[in-house]
Every structure is written in C-alpha cells, then in structure tokens.
Image (spheres, rainbow, N blue to C red):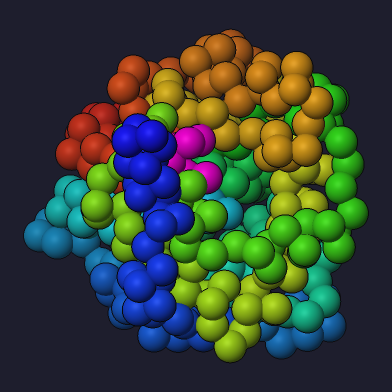
Amino acid sequence: MRRLLITLLAAGTLLPAAAAQRPTYGPQLEGFDYPHEVKRFAFESQRQSLSMAYLDIEPQGTANGRTVVLLHGKNFCAATWESAIEALRAAGYRVIAPDQIGFCKSTKPEHYQFSFAQLAANTQALLKSLGIDRAVIIGHSMGGMLAARYALQYPAAVEQLALVNPIGLEDWKAEGVPWRDIQDWYAGELKTDFASIKRYQLAVYYNGQWKPEYDRWVEMLAGMYAGPGKERVAWNQALASDMVLNQPVVYEFPKLKVPTTLFIGQRDRTAIGKDKAPPDVAKRIGGYPALGKRAAKAIPDATLIEFEDLGHSPQVEDPARFNDALLKTLSP
C-alpha cells in the first residue's frame, strides 16, 4: 500500500490542491517565459497566414561561423533545449530553435495538413529568411523524425545531422499498432492534464525516476491543455499524432547522405500508439537499445552514442553529459 501511495504521489494523481494552483497558458503558450527573446516568422502556407515562433541566439565570445538548428519533440518546445542552447552558444555557435506550426508559441491552425515534408519546408523557409543556407540539424523525439525528413529533403543544407532519441525508429503500424481516427486522437488529447503527462513521462521517458526539475516542462504543456485555447491545442496535437503514426521515415534511413550521429538513452520505451496495441505488440515495440543499433546500421556511416542510464530526453535528464557528448560530436 505504501509503495502504491508513493507511486501515485510521484505521478501527481493525489495532489488536488497543487493541481488547482497550477498555471494555465494561452493557446500559443502565452504566459510561459522562454529563456531568450521569442521572434516570429510570418509566412503563407496552405492558403492561410501563419506565424512560427523561434529563438535566434547569437554566440558568446568568438563565433565559429556555424549554425545549429534545434528541432523539438511532440511533447516539448524550443525552450526545452535551454541547457543545450547555453552550451552551444558558449562554444561559438549561432543557435536557431523554432516552435513548429501547431506547437507551443506558434500558430495552431484550425485546418492544416500536417506532414513532416511540410514542417521541413516551413523550417527551410525560416532559415532562408534568416540568410542561413547550411546548418547542423539536431532533432529530438518527434523532432528526430522531422530532422531526418529535412536531411532527406534538403541534403545540401545539412552540415551534420544529430538524432536524439528520435521516435520513428520502427514502423508502429507495420508492427501491429492499429490505425486510429483523428477524432479518437482528439478525444484522448482533451483528457490530457498535468497528472496524465507526468504519469506517461515517468513510465515511458524516465524509467520511473523523476526529478523535480522535470515538473517545469510538464507544467508548460499542461498549462496549454488547461487554458482558454485547449480545444485548438488538443486538435493540433491530434493532427500531429496522426502524422507521426502514418508517416514513417525509417525505411529511408539508407538514403541519408549527411554525417549522422544517434544519441540514444537506453531506458527509453517510447512508442506511439502503444496504449491501443495488442499486449504482445505493446511489449515488443519501443525497445531503444535494439532500435538505436538497428538505425545506426541502416544509416550510412552513422555514429551511435549510447547513454546506458538515461531515458527519452538525455538533454534534460543529464544536461552536462549530453552537452559534452554533443560538442565533441560537432567539433571539426
């Protein structure tokens, strides 16, 4: 009984008083402060005017003339790269960290055909507007799928590619995860709150080990789901989930033509649709120790860096170790 109580407390399910005091944010994450000035890129896409929020951080000290682009995951934002941004700028890099359309501080359209190709094109348009022709592309989680698509779509614009616990190292539908109607995704997203986000991340991302500093990123997400634009937030997340499940990039890994490094926390068990999968499928998918090795073999001349005791977000779980490994990888 005591162990159950501890688990529930850790997951945030027995904290009604605290829940009542949690912050709420607007549909474009209004009210949540980023570590740097948020800029905006206005552009036209799919017959509508959109605004992509992004961070553009100049290097500290001597600039090395290189640019790093950081692509966030589905349950993350540009701000989640906070520690990596500081390490990179201190090493002389210019850092660009966008919020993709449909996420965080960017526009959440009522109607949008989400595709990784479209998000890659949006990102390319942003970089072109900033005069950036070539950059290091780093993607985490869903951002890893996007980074791979970007490198396939714009190989000449990619200096190096780094994938940090990317999802999509397997084709979940081919493995037996059932297709889901977007309305079903939407219904599930509407139920999202602080407790459910923390419970999921505790079990899947961090192998049952929680640190108080993770709460900030859970509150960031939960605040949008609890705010005045929660329906639009949930709908955009449902569209994104449909994209992730139905647009695998794993089959194209052998076509990557850029220097690629995989950073894989071995305790990660992320697999989209696992909650609706048959038990034998749910048990089999999301095994990152094997998936990382398989991806490294599929990607020409890829380098694999494994973190034995870390999970889905090495850059959040152990920033110092991750940043050290990243900077060594990027060093000429």
Give 255 or 6, whichever is nearer the viewer.
Answer: 6
Position of residue 106 in the picture relative to residue 186 (left or right): left
Percent position (x, y) of residue 320? 18, 39
Which residue sits at x=74%, y=70%? Answer: 235
Give the vertical position of 172 relative to 239 (above or below). Answer: above
What quarter of the picture does the N terminus occupy?
top left
Instruction: Determine the residue positioned at 15% across, 53% down.
Output: 90
Q: Residue at 35% of width from left, 72% of height from top? A: 17
Q: Position of residue 179 (x, y in %)?
A: 88, 41
Which SS does the magenta portion mostly show? Answer: helix
Give the image location of residue 103, x and y in percent: 58, 68
In-image side of 68 versus 293 (left or right): left
Above-or-below relation of 196 to 319: below
280 relative to 81, above or below: above
**Would residue 131 be visible to someone looking at this image?**
no
Residue 74 percent across, percent down from the top left: 58, 54
* Residue range highlighted in magenta: 200-206
Quarter placement of the C terminus: top left
Decide which of 246, 65 is in the foreground and name it: 246
Membership of 9 in magenta stretch: no
Comparing 85 with 223, the one in front is: 223
Between 237 and 293, the one nearer to me in the picture: 237
Residue 204, compared with residue 80, is above or below; it is above
Please identify the residue farthest to the front as the structure is shown.
Answer: 1
The residue furthest left is 61
Q: Residue at x 35, y 49 (%)?
A: 9
Quadrant assignment, res 3: top left
For residue 293, side relative to residue 24 (left or right)? right
Tally of numbered discs? 0
Left or right of 31? Residue 157 is: right
